[in-house]
Image (cartoon, rainbow, N blue to C red):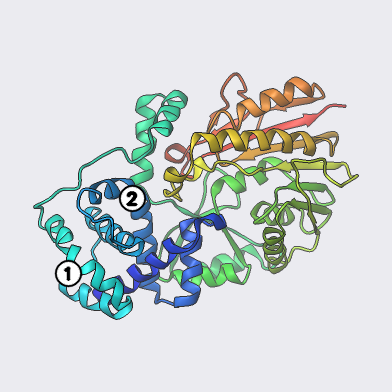
Amino acid sequence: MGVEEDSAEAIALALEAIKIQSDLGLSLKSRLYRAAREARPNLNALKLARRMLHLYAINRNRVRRFLGDFLSNELSNDSRILLELLISSLISNLHLGEPEKLALNLRRVLSKELIEEVEPWLGIIRTIKENIVEVPEEERYPSWFINMLSRILGKDEAENLMRFQDRVKPPTYFTVNRLLSREDDVLKLFERYDIEFSEDERLEGIYVIKSMKKSKKVLDLARKGLIMIHDFSSYYATYVMDPKPGDVVLDVCAAPGTKTILMAIAMRNKGKIISVDSSFTRLRTHLKRVKKAGVLIVNDVLADATKPLPLSLKADIVLVDPPCSSIGLFWREPIYRWTIKPRHIRMFARFQVKILENSSAHVKSNGTLLYSTCSISIEENELVLEDFLKTHPEFDLEEVYPKLGDHGLRGLSEARRLYPHRDRCNGFFLAKLVKRS
């Protein structure tokens, strides 16, 4: 396939991904893979569509404001999105091929009605490409986030983080599923497939992919359950918990199951993990994942953790990884920056207080309660812990080892904070509490 053919296929795929209902709780990346299951695109088109969506998420508000000065109100939503995709790619210097050939290929993959509606407006794109008209620069993050980040990190460091997230591609981390294969055997497969990787120097057992010629080989290993692809922060949380064979673990808000599987690997499939989630759909997906990974020690429980849990057990480890605003994921999922609002942070913080309270009742004496979020807001992290520790003197906040990232704020120095630009992972918060009585 030529560049223009791949580009047209990628544009059609990205358009379908954006049109999938956002209220399903899916990220743009997840929506892309859902659309790809139907379209079955070639790998180059899929990669390009993912890059286009990433750039669209970063530039969406900037492009929409620019187009608002030109477009008529009668233009359909699909046509607007198509123009936004094209302009976003163009101002980011994404190579889509020759315009005339691309237009011909778009006629092949898009509906006649859509093409006819958009064609009169393609002149806008030509003027941008020929530098006749410029799309004005503006903030790539909402003002509330910039202000919040500046309060946490300081203005200069906040600007460093935002600039880093827009310019640097997130790394791909993986761990070997030792329940299904020997680590050495799987790593030899990586070498055979010409996949360059190295063990992360911060923690033993997690690897980062440096380059690969055939990403399909990596995806095949992941589909077979031989490796797990996940963020560094998920592995760090499991490493800090240090679950042992024979432990009883309560995994609250467990879906989609990454940490569940990592814990089962560390426990060598010996002991018990009780995974709780409030969504039947998410729990069903969780069950499929853990079974494919060869995990035998998990029992799933459908329950709402904002209410007292229907369990009588006391666990050695209770993991509370509650729903959060996900502002630590702006690097991997830039569309979140335009959908998350300050009210969402306050809403999630209220849920987190309840979930932590109800989960803490199931920690045994001298047991561990681990609280983590993929948010860097103080409201969802330090303030939640402060309120909890005031009313639960039986819990002590303990140092997290190894001490990666930065210390917690508001005097909670034992907790840890991870930031994308410093730690090459999602924004993340982690705190370890031990019950003394």
> 399 left or right of 369?
left
Question: What x and y, as percent, mark residue 257?
Answer: 67, 56
Residue at image coords 76%, 51%: 276
Question: What x and y, as percent, mark residue 112?
Answer: 29, 78
SS for tag 1?
Answer: helix
Q: Nearer the viewer, residue 317 or 285?
A: 285
Q: Nearer the viewer, residue 258 or 86?
A: 86
Residue at image coords 43%, 43%: 337
Pointer 1 local density, CA inside 10 Å: few below 14, some 14–19, many at least 20: some
Q: Which amino acid, mark 1?
A: Pro
Residue at image coords 42%, 48%: 334
Question: What x and y, as percent, mark residue 123?
Answer: 14, 62
Asked whether the beta carbons under mark 2 and mark 1 sit within 8 Å of each other, the answer is no
Q: Which mark is residue 219?
A: none
Q: Is residue 157 above or below residue 190?
A: above
Q: Which amino acid, mark 2?
A: Arg
Q: Is residue 7 above or below residue 263?
A: below
* Circle 2 or circle 1, nearest the eye: 2
SS for tag 2?
Answer: helix
Q: Nearer the viewer, residue 334 or 428?
A: 334
Upstream in sequence: badge 2 or badge 1:
2
The quadrant in which the C terminus is found is top right
> 162 left or right of 259?
left
The tally of labels here is 2
The quadrant in which the N terminus is found is bottom left
Residue beneath disc 2 = 60
- The residues tagged by marks 2 and 1 sit, at their Cα atoms, a distance apart of 21 Å
Residue beneath disc 1 = 99
